[in-house]
Each structure stands twice: as C-alpha cells, then as structure tokens.
Image (tube, rainbow, N blue to C red):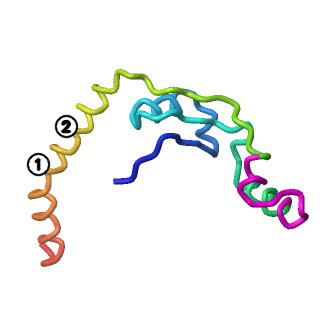
Amino acid sequence: GMSFSLMRVSGHAANEDFLCALKADVLGVPVEVPELVDCELLGDAAASALALGEASSLGESARSLVKIRRRLEPNVERGAYKRGFESYKEALLALEPVDRDRASHQEDGT
C-alpha cells in the first residue's frame, strides 16, 4: 500500500541495465543508478562527514556524496506486466487447495 515516485538501486545488479529497466517498467517509476553502486560505504562516509562538522545534517551530507550515474524512465507500455502479474496471482489462488492438502499430509506423516 505504499506509494513512491523514484527507486534507487545498489549492489552488483545495479550494473545490469536490463534489470534496472525492468524494475522501472514493472513499478512504473524512474530508477536511478548511483556512480558508486556499493553505496553502504557512502552511509559511513556521510556519518563521518557529519561528525567532522563538514555537513549540518546527515541528509545534506548524503546528498553531497551520492552522484547519479544514470536514470532509467519507465516504459509506458506496462500492460503486459500487469496482465502477467494477474495471471501469476490467479495461479497462486488455484494452487491453494493443493498446498493445503500437501501441508495436511506433512502434518499427519503421510
């Protein structure tokens, strides 16, 4: 139920344009990739800069350190993803009785 208007990605997968574009398309929001994709280190650097008095807030410090390498805009043709997700949810619902049956057999040891 949360809404958001932007996603920033990190880690090794952030270097994969296809995955980042897919996220943008499926979620319908822009995806930004920072220059330094291993950005956990930037949090440490931002906290250190704040502690040294080089910034007035953690947010200011982080904004000064994070540089965006590229931004991928969502493709407006998202209907295929929505249809696919609806089919996926329908398949899960259809398998509920099978899953319940399997679980009951595990409980009684059969």
Q: In front of the other: label 2 or label 1?
A: 2
Q: Which residue is mark 2?
A: 87
Where disc 1 sits, the SS reads helix
Q: Residue at x 12, y 78 (%)?
A: 108
Residue 29: percent from the left, percent from the top?
A: 46, 35
Please tell me whether residue 11 is drawn above or below residue 51 in the rendered image.
above
Q: Residue at x 39, y 34 (%)?
A: 26
Residue 86: percent from the left, percent from the top?
A: 21, 38
Residue 77: percent from the left, percent from the top?
A: 35, 21
Mark 2 or mark 1, earlier in chain = 2
Which contiguous range is marked in magenta?
A: 49-63
Amino acid bearing label 2: Ser
Residue 23: percent from the left, percent from the top?
A: 46, 35
User: Which numbered marker is on residue 10?
Assistant: none
User: Residue 90 occupies which quadrant of the picture?
Assistant: top left
Q: Residue at x 13, y 64 (%)?
A: 100
Q: Residue at x 76, y 55 (%)?
A: 41
Please tell me whether residue 88 is drawn above or below residue 46 in the rendered image.
above
| Quadrant in the picture for the C terminus | bottom left
User: Which numbered marker is on residue 94?
Assistant: 1
Residue lying at the far bottom in this picture: please name it: 108
Amino acid bearing label 1: Ala
